[in-house]
Image (spheres, rainbow, N blue to C red):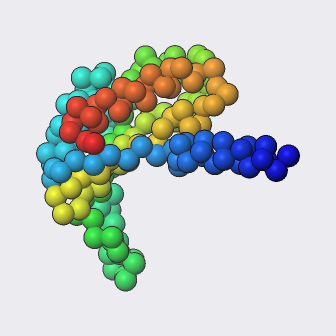
Amino acid sequence: MFKRFMVSILVISGTMLFAGNGIYKVSAKKDFSSALKSLTHTLDKQNLYIISKANISSTLKRMKNKLGADYNKQHFDSVTSIIFCNPFYANEVMNLDPDMMALCPLKIMLMEKNGKTTALFVLPTTHASKSSAKKVLKEIENKVKKALKSAGFK
């Protein structure tokens, strides 16, 4: 009985470790401008269209006095959110599982520090385990990963 219990715990632990926190994290040895330019191009090639870019670092910089000693403790040079979508995928997700529209539009957070840019992307399938849109969300997820890889992120 104890052996069966331990095997169950190991299987569950391994699954949680594999699933991680649902955030896909990759980096490129590129400055922010180069990384953004590459990513813009590769997202477009995947038919993922940038809706807007939110320059988080400039917003924080304007609040520097209010934030005081807590301002940018990690010393990031640039932090920007890239917000993007594909209307055909959005329509398909909406038709299959309207609740999954909470994920739209998607975003990639780019954070640069010392000439290295990191991309953070919340994996949509993390939230879609029982969704009828899971297959479509996985397809979108793969396109985003492909765009990041093509832009030089590893």
Q: Quadrant of residue 99?
A: top right
Q: Position of residue 103 (x, y in %)?
A: 52, 36
Residue drawn 16% across and 58% down? 115
Image coordinates of residue 142 in percent, x first then y, are: 40, 27
Using the image as rendered, state which of residue 91 and residue 22 is in the foreground: 22
Q: Can you name the residue that lies furthest to the bottom here? A: 69
Which residue is at a point 46% across and 42% down the rendered structure image? Answer: 122
Q: Residue at x 18, y 51 (%)?
A: 29
57 lies above or below 25:
below
Quadrant of the image containing the C terminus: top left
Q: Position of residue 131 (x, y in %)?
A: 64, 25
As rendered, which of 79 and 17 lies closer to the eye? 17
Query: Residue 145 in the image: x percent, y percent?
Result: 35, 33
Look at 71% across and 44% down and name the residue there. Answer: 7
In the depicted structure, whether residue 17 falls above or below residue 124? below
- Side of 12 where 54 appears, left or right: left
In this rendered view, identify the residue nearer to me: 74 or 50: 74
Say which quarter of the image contains residue 133: top right
